[in-house]
Image (cartoon, rainbow, N blue to C red):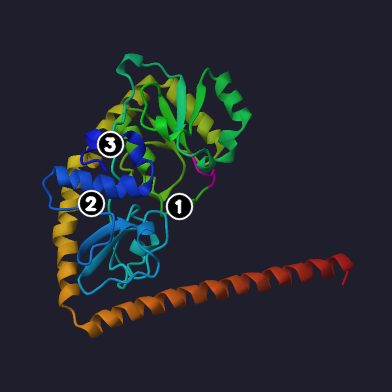
């Protein structure tokens, strides 16, 4: 396993466990923070890992503090601390005392290649970076490509992870998971917005809570909720050179918030002020206190499962009732 970011190939950071766990380790290590990367679970200490790295049934020992990066997965049943990547994540918004959770911004893409300054004011290449299945269906149709061609624009879907860091020939990004209002995606990070800021390109994005949480100015990005709005946003950027310049300059300022050195400082603060005290409390707690904590977690998980089961049952009853009503109407009853 590489011991520095300089020796890491870009593809190392395409998966969440590397993008979060490995990158966090390498950046903290480079800053002189005492931490270790291990392939097996230590018997004691503060253990940070992605959600999928901890088995579902794993419970912390008397000298283990489990800190889980939740990502876009469900919370771990027994981890004492959770890290989430969206300020609107349910676990934060509901402020459940049993589920101690903290928000951390996502790391920027290592090795990111910004837009080539030699492109000047050219506005030709519009790109989406990410897995194609996560792109709104309307933007995958040939008719969308035809619309952009008619505007003198070229549409690029960068679905190959090996190209995700290269913005050198890109003039704007467009990323929409679904064209609809109030599509929160409250478990997703604002990564695509961060990348656009760091790359020096304007962003056109869907209505997502992570983007809105970061938005301080209309220059941060253009929000769209329909394909028609996306076309209007592209036309606006195409015609307004000064708007593009203003958005790029604003992005440079916004990018300072996710510079690695700033995020390293936030991680140091979290570990020193939150994780270490939590570890000390756990280690010095009585066996009864730790047992009660785990039992309460068990109960919370079971209760949540029961609520989901009841909701599915209600939905099923509602569907059957509507079917019977429709059949009765069809028969003229």
x, y (%) of residue 292? 29, 82
Q: Indicate which disc residue 8 carries.
A: 3
- Residue occupying the point 18% across, 63% down: 274
Task: State how far apart marks 3 and 1 are (Cα).
Answer: 33 Å
x, y (%) of residue 142? 62, 28
Chief secondary structure of the magenta portion: loop
Q: Which residue is mark 2?
A: 37
Earlier residue among tags 1 and 2? 2
Q: Is residue 120 visible?
A: no
- Residue occupying the point 37% across, 26% down: 167
Instruction: Please determine whether, in this image, residue 315 is positioned above or below residue 216.
Output: below
Q: Residues within 10 Å of mark 2 (few under 14, many from 20)?
A: some
Task: State how far apart marks 3 and 2 are (Cα).
Answer: 15 Å
- Residue occupying the point 31% across, 73% down: 98
Secondary structure, mark 3, is: loop
Q: What segment is highlighted magenta in the picture? A: 176-180
Can you tell which quarter of the image residue 191 is in? top left
Q: On the rendered image, what quadrant is the C terminus found in?
A: bottom right
Q: Is residue 262 visible?
A: yes
Secondary structure, mark 2, is: loop
Earlier residue among tags 3 and 1? 3
Q: Which residue is mark 1?
A: 184
x, y (%) of residue 279? 18, 68
Q: On the rendered image, what quadrant is the N terminus found in?
A: top left
């Amino acid at each position: 396993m590489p011991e520095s970011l300089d020796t890491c190939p870009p593809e190392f950071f395409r998966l969440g466990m590397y993008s979060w766990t490995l990158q966090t380790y390498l950046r903290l290590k480079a800053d002189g923070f005492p931490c270790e990367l291990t392939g097996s679970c230590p018997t004691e200490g503060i253990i940070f890992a992605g959600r999928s790295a901890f088995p579902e049934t794993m419970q912390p020992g008397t000298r283990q503090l489990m800190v889980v990066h939740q990502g876009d997965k469900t919370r771990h049943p027994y981890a004492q601390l959770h890290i989430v990547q969206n300020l609107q994540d349910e676990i934060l918004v509901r402020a459940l005392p049993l589920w101690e959770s903290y928000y951390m911004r996502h790391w920027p893409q290592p090795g990111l290649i910004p837009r080539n300054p030699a492109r000047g004011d050219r506005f030709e290449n519009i790109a989406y970076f990410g897995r194609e299945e996560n792109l709104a269906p309307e933007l995958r149709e040939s008719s969308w490509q035809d619309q952009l061609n008619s505007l003198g624009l070229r549409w690029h879907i960068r679905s190959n992870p090996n190209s995700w860091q290269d913005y050198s020939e890109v003039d704007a990004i467009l990323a929409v998971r679904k064209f609809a209002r109030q599509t929160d995606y409250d478990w997703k990070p604002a990564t695509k917005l961060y990348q656009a800021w760091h790359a020096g390109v304007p962003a056109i994005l869907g209505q997502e809570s992570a983007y809105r949480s970061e938005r301080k100015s209309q220059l941060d990005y253009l929000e769209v909720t329909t394909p028609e709005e996306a076309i209007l946003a592209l036309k606006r950027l195409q015609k307004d050179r000064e708007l593009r310049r203003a958005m790029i300059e604003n992005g440079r300022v916004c990018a300072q918030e996710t510079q690695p050195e700033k995020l390293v400082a936030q991680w140091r603060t979290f570990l020193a002020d939150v994780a270490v005290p939590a570890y000390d409390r756990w280690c010095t707690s009585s066996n009864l206190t730790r047992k009660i904590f785990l039992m309460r977690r068990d109960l919370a998980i079971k209760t949540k499962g029961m609520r989901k089961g009841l909701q599915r049952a209600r939905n099923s009853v509602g569907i059957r009732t509507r079917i019977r009503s429709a059949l009765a109407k069809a028969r003229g009853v």
